[in-house]
Amino acid sequence: MNVGEQSVADAVVAWRRWCVRALALLLATAIALAGVQASRGSREVDADDWPPVVAIVRADAGAPGVPIPRSFLGLSMEYQGFAHDAGARAGASADPLLAPLLGGLASGGGPPLLRIGGRSSDASWWDPVQRAAPGGVSFAITPRWLERLRAVVRASGAHVLLGLNLATRRPANAAAWARAAARGLPAGALTAFEIGNEPDLYGHVAWYAVPLARGVPASGRYARGRRYARDARYGPRSFTHEFLRYAAAVRRAVAGARFTGPGYSTPRWMPGLPAFLRAARPALAAVTYHRYPLRACFSPPLAPTIRHLLAPTASRGLAASVAPYAAQARAHGLPFWITELNSVACGGRRGVSDTFAAALWGADTLLALAHAGVARVEIHDHLGSPYDPFALHERHGRWLAHVAPLYAALRLVAQLASAGTRVAPLPVAGRARVVAWQLAGPAGRRRVVLIDEDPAARGVVRVVLGTRRAATLVRLDAPSLGARAGVRLAGQAFGADARLHGSPRVERVPAVGGVYAVPMRRPGIAVLSVG
């Protein structure tokens, strides 16, 4: 074999060896891709399958945070709504589902607060003997209603805030109802009374309407058929005078009775809050206010859409707007409560209030309110409204529940807000719309709550915790922001019996140099826990 032939032979051998190595590499790559493909489904794998980093969150173990108060979370219901949901109506059986749904909102190491009131406070009165109701009263509170309230309180462990009718100008009836409630409820369950509902609207929003004779033009019928609780000159001074008169009448009937107020719904009268507190301070248990970020009535400046509900102004902005009032309350030695909160005023908006987006808004808003110094928050339920946290119905003698996405978020926040927990916001860097909160509990337990509101962001959120301990991850997720069903809390879903069903799903997340990679596949809430 000459030199030329030897060179050719060497080249052939070298080429064959390269082919073998290349085939081995291709085979290994194919096996690896097949494994990735199997774990992700049957779709084709390309560069987009390798998740980008969409946000970076840096937690601060030294951040002091704000303590989440005892009994931070609760529920607000109308008088009629409670009658329906508790089975207090004539012919209805007692509902066993309301109590566990209410009890599931216990937070801060204390029981939930059940507020009965809202607009129905000024449309209800105590009527144990079925008398003729005065104008504007459309609901009679009966002994059967009170019996059902007592049963729900006993079963749930809830405490109660009861609304009193101020619009009728009948303090004697309010005092009689207060006396019956104080005697009928379990000892220690009655926290306070709320006198009237949103008195700042008494001269501007109709209390009720009366029918007029035929022949009156439609416009005149509308104008003259409306009745207001007070005339347009009614202001904070007049309300304070009436409040004190009612409080005195109730205290004569119930020794040591406590009250909340003023319960305004707009900032219009809030500049007069210090004057109200100076006058009413001895009788007050808490300062109260009502808030909704969006409105479905009164020519809203922002239409109630999912985009507007998830805007920062609707959650953290709402909390910032009430922080000065909470500070004023603390300066007078009183806690500040929001006794009525939900997504869209005037009953909510379908396609917004009843979607998974409302759950994300609710979790972010509650944590922001706790950080702003709000001591208690009652989520409002108005029977048959899109924003109701749940709906209860009796069919053939059996009670069934439809649990809305918002309630799943309330349950998650209640679980996170254990006794001794402190909340603080965390900075987020990146292109995705992700909100982060740190919840620091006793014994070094830390949780990072990631609220992903961005349907376009798919990737990894890097959480820098500065610890090497393994973490657990639970999620609150749904098919989409607009989903009304398919919501899962740690892999479980609420059934018609108001209970969670399915196997709990807890993911393990290792620490790599003190950094945790949390995959975010679709909008939802991820809770990373260490300790």
Image (tube, rainbow, N blue to C red):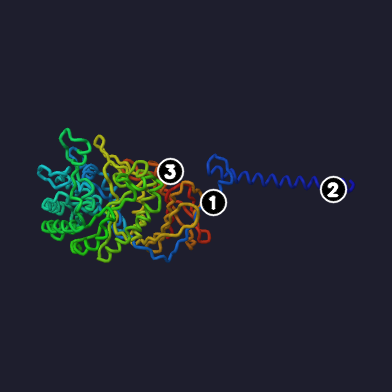
For the question of whether residue 450 can be seen, the reply is yes
Q: Residues within 10 Å of mark 2 (few under 14, many from 20)?
A: few
Q: Position of residue 114 (x, y in %)?
A: 25, 52
Nearer-N-terminus badge (3/1): 1
Instruction: Please state which amino acid type lies under the numbered disc 3.
Output: Ser
Outermost residue on the right side: it is 2
Distance, label 3 to label 2, CA atoms, is 66 Å
Instruction: Please state which amino acid type lies under the numbered disc 2.
Output: Ser
Secondary structure of the residue carrying numbered label 2: helix
Task: Assess whether mark 2 and mark 1 are in contact (beta carbons under 8 angstroms).
Answer: no
Instruction: Please state which amino acid type lies under the numbered disc 1.
Output: Pro
Q: Which residue is mark 1?
A: 52
Q: How many marks?
A: 3
Task: Assess whether mark 2 and mark 3 are in contact (beta carbons under 8 angstroms).
Answer: no
Distance, label 3 to label 1, CA atoms, is 21 Å
Q: Nearer the viewer, residue 341 or 524?
A: 341
Q: Position of residue 450 (x, y in %)?
A: 43, 54
Query: Quadrant of the rendered structure where residue 387 is?
Result: top left
**Residue at image location 61% in from the left, 44% down from the top:** 31
Labelled disc at residue 480: 3
Q: Position of residue 385 (x, y in %)?
A: 29, 42
Nearer-N-terminus badge (1/2): 2
| Left or right side of 468 for 331 | left
Q: Residues within 10 Å of mark 3 (few under 14, many from 20)?
A: some
Residue 166 higher or lower than 62, as above or below: above
- In the image, which is nearer the foreground, mark 1 or mark 2? 1
Quadrant into which the C terminus falls: bottom left
Labelled disc at residue 7: 2
Q: Position of residue 120 (x, y in %)?
A: 21, 46
Nearer-N-terminus badge (3/2): 2
